[in-house]
Image (cartoon, grey):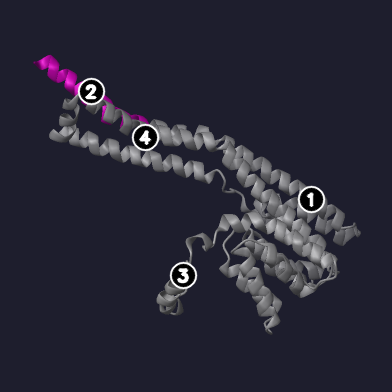
């Protein structure tokens, strides 16, 4: 066996030198990254509490993280050790790693690298947000599983009944392919059935997509504020730091607030305009931040409570969206599937019955 293995190694050595093998099982997986991110961030937080630097914490967490997350974090630590700034390495990792939670994790790590301070507590909060987001995604998928199964069954029903009709009455197929009206029924029925199947699949897939991006990303923004304030920044500096790394739905509006503050407007007064740009979901966070600026109320405890409320609100809205899926499926059922069923099954049977009556 050893001789055979040595011979194989010798014969295939040139191929390995030209192009290293890449196995499909090691392809980047967004689902695997999103699942592992919360535990990885908590591992970093434990390392930081033990006295490690952020780069060392990233390197330690990379050893236990699954691929491709572990490999990407190891590259971050190695790049920072070779002279590149840790912030630049984190941004590069964020742009090359799949996963819905990577952007928030990278923003938190980037702020921790820039500001220092008590990043462990903030990383725990970000891990909680990502874990809750994964739980919501799984719950929505479970709640909509029956609707997705119904969509598959309903979408395939016209074709299944067409096969049954063809087996019971071969003349029905002759009508569909041998007459102009039959060809029109066949083409229209197949087209409507395909449209209805795509429509129902689209409705089921959209159940897990947030309709209100501002409300969905509020917990992420709160976590970034907790990290910036925990690093010792005042509200004005924390606002500027968060605006640079805020989620897309919040970034432009927060940057506008920072610009107004730089022009001399008070932080609380500049924040009052934020709900006008972002809508009502932004009002709770504005109320807490503006109250701290005007009255000096403690921010971190209020932000912790607000983050919990934002996560619960996101879960509630996701559950409502999943439960509305069966109702939304009625529209493609009535407009597409039922007409396709009639054209592919009822019309051939009626044509055969009429032909029998003529005879």
Residue bearing the label numbered 2: 168
Specify the quadrant of the image occupied by residue 186.
top left
Q: Quadrant of the C terminus?
A: top left
The image shows residue 298 at horizontal and vertical percentages of: 89, 57
Mark closer to the observer (3, 2): 3
Q: Is residue 226 visible?
A: no
Q: Is residue 25 magenta?
A: no
- 265 or 143, which lies in front? 143
Q: Earlier in the sequence, mark 1 or mark 4?
A: 4
> For the point 56% across and 69% down, which residue is it?
96
- 310 or 131, which lies in front? 131
Residue bearing the label numbered 3: 5
Count residues near mark 4 (Cα–Cα under 10 Å), then give few for <14, some for 14-19, many for 20+: some
Task: Answer with left or right where residue 22 lies relative to residue 82.
Answer: left
Magenta span: 336-359
Q: Earlier in the sequence, mark 3 or mark 2?
A: 3
Q: Earlier in the sequence, mark 3 or mark 1?
A: 3
């Amino acid at each position: 066996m050893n001789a055979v293995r040595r011979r194989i190694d010798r014969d295939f050595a040139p191929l390995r030198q030209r192009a290293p093998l890449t196995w499909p099982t090691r392809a980047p997986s967004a689902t695997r990254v999103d699942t592992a991110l919360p535990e990885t961030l908590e591992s970093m937080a434990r390392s930081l509490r033990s006295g490690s630097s952020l780069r060392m914490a990233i390197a330690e967490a990379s050893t236990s993280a699954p691929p491709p997350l572990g490999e990407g974090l190891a590259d971050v630590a190695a790049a920072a050790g070779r002279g590149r700034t840790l912030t630049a390495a984190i941004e590069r990792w964020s742009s090359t790693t799949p996963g819905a939670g990577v952007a928030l994790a990278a923003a938190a790590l980037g702020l921790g690298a820039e500001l220092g301070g008590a990043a462990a507590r903030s990383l725990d909060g970000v891990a909680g947000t990502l874990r809750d987001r994964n739980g919501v995604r799984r719950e929505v998928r479970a709640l909509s599983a029956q609707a997705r199964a119904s969509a598959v069954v309903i979408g395939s029903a016209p074709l299944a009944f067409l096969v049954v009709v063809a087996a019971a009455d071969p003349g029905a197929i002759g009508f569909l392919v041998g007459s102009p009206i039959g060809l029109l029924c066949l083409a229209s029925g197949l087209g409507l059935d395909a449209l209805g199947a795509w429509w129902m699949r689209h409705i089921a897939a959209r159940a897990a997509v947030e309709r209100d991006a501002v409300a969905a990303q509020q917990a992420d923004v709160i976590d970034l504020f907790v990290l910036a304030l925990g690093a010792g920044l005042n509200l004005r500096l924390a606002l500027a730091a968060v605006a640079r790394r805020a989620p897309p739905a919040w970034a432009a509006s927060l940057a506008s607030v920072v610009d107004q503050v730089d022009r001399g407007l008070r932080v609380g007064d500049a924040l009052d305009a934020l709900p006008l740009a972002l809508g009502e979901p932004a009002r709770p966070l504005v109320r807490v931040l503006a109250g701290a600026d005007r009255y000096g109320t403690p921010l971190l405890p209020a932000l912790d409570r607000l983050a919990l409320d934002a996560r619960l609100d996101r879960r509630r809205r996701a559950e409502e969206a999943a439960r509305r899926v069966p109702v939304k499926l009625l529209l493609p059922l009535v407009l597409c599937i039922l007409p396709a069923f009639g054209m592919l099954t009822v019309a051939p049977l009626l044509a055969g019955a009429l032909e029998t009556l003529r005879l």
